[in-house]
Image (tube, helix red, strand yellow):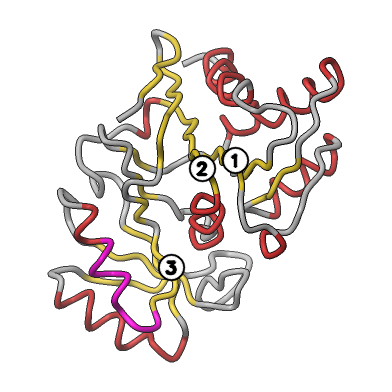
Amino acid sequence: MTTNIKQQAGIAAANLVQNGMGVGLGTGSTVFFTLERLAERQKTEGLKFFGVSTSFSTTLLCRKMGIELKDSGSVSHLDLAIDGTDEIDPNLNLIKGRGAAHLLEKIVASLADKFVIVADSGKKVQNLGEKFPLPLEILPAALGLVEARIKSLGGSMEVRTAGACKDGPTISDSGNIIADAKLGLIKEPEILCKELDSIPGLVGHGLFAGLAKEAFIAGEAGVEHISP
């Protein structure tokens, strides 16, 4: 796949932004082109909008590109949110969270009237869970409880390690533990969402069911526009 096609997908999403909008801005190689196009539109069209970033990397890019940002805690409504994904099924249900930012990403997506995905075709799956486990964000005091509940759902859970640069578990920006749950193929995401939402101490999970309204998917043949 050429970079140009991914750029087209990112641009297509950026062209949805109108004057005066509040826009959630996600992360990813395709979202980068969305940010680039938005910065260009500010200069060439005088486009005025504000963004809410879902990651520190996106915050740095927005600062560099001159995109105005507001803190998510100061905003109660967004017109649009644009983000990438790790997996996307035919009904636009998603798995997100490989970057451990899924809790903030879900908050921002839930603030928006319309949540739009930009990604490459390698993220498409028939059923969620085909390629990646489901990321979880857990209060440290609830680690044992959450693991037991995941087992009761027929799955297993593993605390994510921080990697070569740091010993110990991966910790979210909110100070919680990141873990990954293997639950097999997720054929009923809405039902699983409700079961996960009912677990005390599980403050966020990377299953996004029924949130995305559109997707621009970059593939070898061009950009595929999907809506449920």
Q: Residue at x 84, y 15 (%)?
A: 44
Q: Looking at the image, is mark 3 or mark 1 nearer the viewer?
A: 1
Give above or below for 133 relative to 116. Answer: below
Which structural element holds mark 1? strand
Q: CA distance from mark 3 to mark 1?
A: 23 Å
Q: Residue at x 79, y 21 (%)?
A: 40
Q: Residues within 10 Å of mark 1 (few under 14, many from 20)?
A: some
Task: Compare marks 3 and 2 and give the one earlier in the sequence.
Answer: 2
Amino acid type at circle 2 is Asp
Would you say 209 lies left or right of 161 here? left
Asked where in the image residue 125 lies, by quadrant, the reply is: top left
Please provide percent x and percent y for residue 21: 69, 37
Task: Compare marks 1 and 2 and give the one earlier in the sequence.
Answer: 1
Q: Which residue is mark 1?
A: 79
Task: Compare marks 3 and 1 and give the one earlier in the sequence.
Answer: 1
State the residue in front, 152 or 19.
19
